[in-house]
Image: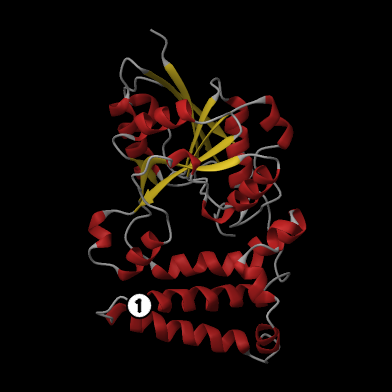
Amino acid sequence: MNLFEFSVIIPTFNREKQLINILKNLKSQLNNKYKIEIIICDSYSDYNKKIFPKQKYNFKIKYININENILAKKRNFGIKLSKYKYIILLDDDCIPDRNFLKEYHKSFIEIKPNSILSGIVDYPIKYLKKSNYIKYRNSKHFKYTDHKNYYNNYLPANKIVAMNMGFINSSAMKKLGYFNEKFIGYGFEDFEFGYRYNKFGYKLIKTRARIIHDEGAPNLEKYLNKFFHLGRDGMKNLILINKNSAKKTTYNKLENNLIFKIITKMPKLEFLLLNIEKILLVFEKFQNIYLPYLYDFLRTLSYTRGFLNRDKKKLKPNNRDWYE
């Protein structure tokens, strides 16, 4: 009996606990049908990596360090090192569900080679029960739907996520170049990837493979910091790398809105936005009613602050902060 072989690529930095949970979960899913290799791409994290060989895993782990702490570069590096044609991408805070490999197996059998799979993203139940902010984040991802034509239900580029993605590696993909490595800092590298591949005839397809996105205890400020960097660096990168894809984003529409252009010319606007954000963060802690529009507004405030800081700082590829 031939085994179905996966290469699982995990870019990482300073998330030892979640990384070990990922490996344990994958270990428990292996049977006489599947074979996997794990390729972990790090940037010299501040923990003892000897812990991985000490664990007894029923798969091979390749642990690679590269200087550039760039998600796109780490993913590409892992893909190029992979031994098998069935590729699964995971982020280091995405814990696979118990049927993760089984669902990817089903999907890979159903799809054509010119397909990009994107899986379900959920959040820990313990956080969903007590945090409106996590409930909001959870609502932003597509969920399981039980219908016959699941693999003909295509996704737009803004709904795919590289934190839970799969594809059949091919010479055609090698020519297209995987993820664009000019994305330094946070944001848009998976959107640009999906948009570009879609333009070259690839279908963006749902898979029922599910992960639990566990970043630790809910922290709305850290989440908003991502949107600050999205406004400062992510959109700037996207415009330079793929201007046509940038035009399809809601943030491009925001930046080209006349009211936005007028408001962003106001003096001391960043100071004002930062203080409004702080007030709303305090209010959010005491709210008993779920108000999703509050989080939409907070994201817009943070993005706008990032926009106001665009071109004020040049990022370095070897920076050790995910969002710097």
Q: Position of 279 compared to 176: left or right? A: left
Q: Nearer the viewer, residue 75 or 190?
A: 190
Image coords of residue 108 (percent x, y): 47, 28
Residue 59: x, y in percent?
Answer: 39, 20
141 to 207, vertically: above or below: below
Residue 50: which quarter of the image? Answer: top left
What's the residue type where badge 1 is placed? Leu
Residue that badge 1 annotates: 291
- Looking at the image, residue 108 sits to the left or right of residue 56; the answer is right
Whether residue 69 is visible: no
- Which one is in front, 158 or 62? 158
- Left or right: 123 with respect to 230? left
Of the 4 image quadrants, the one containing the C terminus is bottom right
Outermost residue, top side = 1
* Residue drawn at 37 percent across, 52 percent down: 143
**Residue at (46%, 20%) from the top-left corner?**
5
Image quadrant containing the N terminus: top left
Determine crowd level at label 1: few under 14, some 14-19, many 20+ residues with C-alpha closer than 10 A: few
Q: Report which quarter residue 211 is drawn in.
A: top left
Q: Look at the numbered disc 1 and give the secondary structure of its residue.
A: loop
Q: Nearer the viewer, residue 179 or 39?
A: 179
Q: Nearer the viewer, residue 227 or 142?
A: 142
Q: Position of residue 222 (x, y in %)?
A: 45, 66
Classify residue 219 as left or right of residue 159.
Answer: left
Residue 204 visible from this viewpoint: yes
Looking at the image, which residue is at 45% across and 47% down? 14
Identify the image's colour scheme: rainbow, by chain, secondary structure or one colour.
Answer: secondary structure
Residue 34's place in the image compared with 87, above or below, is above
- Where residue 30 appears, as percent x and y from the top left, is 32, 23
